[in-house]
Image: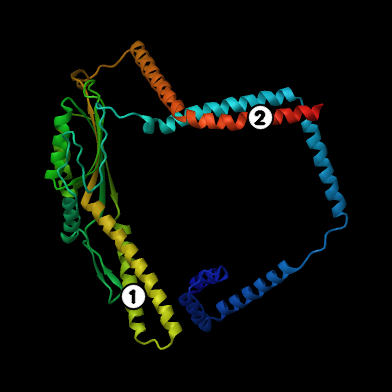
Amino acid sequence: MNCEQHAALLEKLWEDAITPEEAARLREHEESCDACARRRREAELLRGDLDALAQEELPLPEGFHQGWMQLVEQEADNMRKTSEAPKEQRRHFTRFLSLAAAAAFLVGGTLLTRDQLQLTTPSVRTQETSDEEYSGGTGYTNGYSAADTLYMSESTRASGVENYSLSAANGGVEETAESKIIRTVSLSLGSGTFAQDLETLQGLCKEAGGWISYISVSGDEAQASRRASLTLRVPEEKLDAFLQGAGELGRVISQTETAQDVTASYQDIAARLATQQAKMERLQALMSETATLSELLELESAIADTQYTLDSLQSQLNQTDDQVAYATVDVSLREESSADAVTTRELSLGERLLAGLKTGWDTFWSFCKDMLVFLSAALPYLAVLAVIVIPVRIILRKKRHERSE
């Protein structure tokens, strides 16, 4: 331990956050370093003086009570002047706040609950799956069961995804030269044959050895407005082939890809894991040499903490391995007519204004309908609130009227 580490542990000591092992390291360092030992003695003296000072009762300065009473009287005068201000102005302000609160209630409630209050009709299908299973009941399926997903998870680990080895004997890490790259792709497609392309897309993912983490299908088939959102996990070595096949299904609206290099952080976690494994071996070796009960309890506590750290670091490595081995592909599939699929010309200013007006009106009308649904859902709560608030306001007005008389 060096002096900087001693200073850091000394701060933990004052905060009562130091472990018995760290306290022992402090004492061991102070036996060999007079400067650190002197620093600790000075800090202990200073802390004792501060504790003693905090316990002393300081006398109030002369005239404190009189000045304090003057401030209280001045504040009371200010409050009386405020209460005598024109009441009409305050009523206008209160009305403005009431209208603003009502508008915020309507708009905020509508926006927050519009998705929950939408009614499900036979023409709207929304399906959401986990990594284990997806079966929509409408002809869209990924073909994976929970057992398939479990097999893929186990086979991923067994096939060498965790391509690192640790050498706990010498406290070091044997790092691999392979880089750890996490690839993420976002793909937006327009499709004239929505159902067929959705099945083909899921089949491409299955053929590549991947699985579907999430899928949502919504819209009306009669109006050709169906949409599908998918999150796919595709083996990294087959990602390019999968993207090429997916791009041939329909019109590629947009495609973005990011690659994150996590090699340095991965090797750092692996090194920390090796250190903790070596520490665990030393603690287990000390268990056989411990003679007293107190030392045995301290060792058991240290072993438990070390095991928790080992599990956490191993979990981080496993998660990174999974993200590296299987790229994440977010696909947005939108049904479109043949007119939408052709290359569009540049619109004139008048056409853009009309299109913007139509979009704004459709959005406003949809918002109004959502607001009506929200008000109907909130009506029972508003009725109960009115039953409580109206009598209270009547009573308060009556009391104010009696006081004014």
Toward the viewer: 1 or 62?
A: 62
Relative height, residue 398 to residue 356 (above, below): below
Q: Mark on residue 393?
A: 2
Q: Mark on residue 149?
A: none
Q: CA distance from mark 1 to mark 2?
A: 69 Å
Looking at numbered disc 2 in the image, what kind of residue is underneath it? Arg
Quadrant of res 217: top left
Quadrant of res 165: bottom left
Is 289 situated left or right of 13 in this image? left
Q: Are marks 1 and 2 in contact (CB under 8 Å)?
A: no
Q: Where residue 157 sits: x, y (%)?
A: 19, 59
Residue 156, visible in the rendered structure: yes
Q: Mark on residue 280?
A: 1
Is 156 situated left or right of 56 in this image? left
Quick one: label 1 or label 2, which is nearer the N terminus?
Answer: 1
Q: Where residue 318 sits: x, y (%)?
A: 27, 59
Q: Residue at x 28, y 60 (%)?
A: 317
Residue 84, visible in the rendered structure: no
